[in-house]
Amino acid sequence: MANPEKIEACSALPLGQCRRGFKGKLVSVSPVATQGGFDAEELERRLLELGFIEGASVQILHEGPFGRDPIAVRVNDTTVALRRHEAMAILAE
């Protein structure tokens, strides 16, 4: 029999892969080194300051017209714009 915690962990996916209309709950922020942007620690700090904390509700409101970048994300009651590669550091279910 499968462990329920493992099943739940498998259902989390990077916010950068989600499409417009996605609604979910933030599971974690786990950045890796990004190209041409902030280092992993700086990106994590900035996302946390914007309200991307465990348990927060997230919704993708809008996608840019070219390459679906940037995206407008509502986190709790705040709307922010993120690049897709930054949103890849945010896991949601």
Image (cartoon, rainbow, N blue to C red):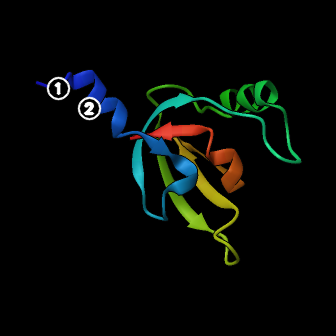
Is residue 46 shown left or right of residue 65?
right
The image shows residue 73, relative to residue 55, as above or below, that is below
Checking the image for residue 2, the label placed there is 1
Q: Quadrant of residue 52?
A: top right
Could you say where residue 13 lies in the image, as x and y percent from the top left? 45, 44
Task: Please name whichever residue, 10 or 58, is drawn nearer the observer in this view of the structure.
Answer: 10
Three-letter code for the amino acid on which mark 1 is drawn? Ala
Of callouts 2 and 1, which one flags the residue occurring earlier in the amino acid sequence? 1
Task: Please name whichever residue, 50 or 68, is drawn nearer the observer in this view of the structure.
Answer: 68
Res. 76 visible in picture: no
Residues under labels 2 and 1: Cα distance?
Answer: 7 Å
- Secondary element under disc 1, as helix, strand or loop, is loop
Res. 21 visible in picture: yes
Could you say where residue 64 lies in the image, as x and y percent from the top left? 67, 71
Checking the image for residue 88, the label placed there is none
Quadrant assignment for the C terminus: top left
Three-letter code for the amino acid on which mark 2 is drawn? Ile
Q: Residue at x 86, y 44 (%)?
A: 37
Cβ–Cβ below 8 Å for labels 2 and 1? yes
Q: Residue at x 70, y 62 (%)?
A: 70
Q: Quadrant of residue 88?
A: top right
Identify the residue under disc 2: 7
Q: Residue most toward the front?
A: 1
Could you say where residue 68 lies in the image, as x and y percent from the top left? 63, 70
Is residue 21 shown left or right of residue 72?
left
